[in-house]
Image (cartoon, rainbow, N blue to C red):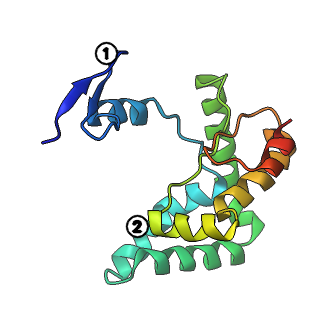
Amino acid sequence: QPVTMTTDSDQPTSADGSCCEQQQQQQQQQHIKRPMNPFMVWAQTRRKVIAAENPKLHNSDISRRLGEEWRTLPDKEKQPFRDEASRLKSEHRAAHPDYKYQPKCKKRPASTQQQSDSSGEDCGDHQNLQQLAKHPKLQDSEINCKKLDQSTAEVQQ
């Protein structure tokens, strides 16, 4: 069991300085999930059917099948899922009026990070964040990332 210490801010931390599990759980509970898009609404039930029919199929293979199946579905069959996604979006907007999507950088293993840092290249997440920052709907949102490079900082301004 990790040793907990008290810092100047009276926040309990583990011996290595990271947040304790209780704080992490609170942050996860406070996190607001994005509303599902039409594909996710459809895939939620369809995934269960495919998994039941093919119990040995890996999740990545199920996801691939779902994507292929969704793309071949006629618009008429997709419409009920678009309607449901729209309803969920409206509900979400009413429940969380100040919500703004704020993508976060994913942490990479230290070995990968050292290789990337030494070559001077950005991680793929940074490239994705740069593209997201240019999106008109995200111009006002704050994109948090510990390792913003110069071009990302310019895009946000």
Taking the image as shown, residue 43 lies to the left or right of residue 20, namely right
Mark with earlier residue (1, 2): 1
Mark toward the viewer: 1 or 2: 1
Residue at the spot 65% in from the left edge and 71% down from the top edge? 70
Residue 80 visible in this rendered orientation of the protein: no
Q: Secondary structure at mark 1?
A: loop
| Residue placed under numbered mark 2 in the picture | 48
* Residue 37 disc label: none
Disc 1 crowd, CA 10 A, few/some/many (<14, 14-19, 20+): few
Mark 2: amino acid: Lys
**Residue nearest the viewer, comparing 5 with 103:** 5
Q: Secondary structure at mark 2?
A: helix
Residue 42 visible in this rendered orientation of the protein: yes
Q: Position of residue 1 (x, y in %)?
A: 12, 42
Q: Position of residue 60 (x, y in %)?
A: 47, 76
| Residue placed under numbered mark 1 in the picture | 10
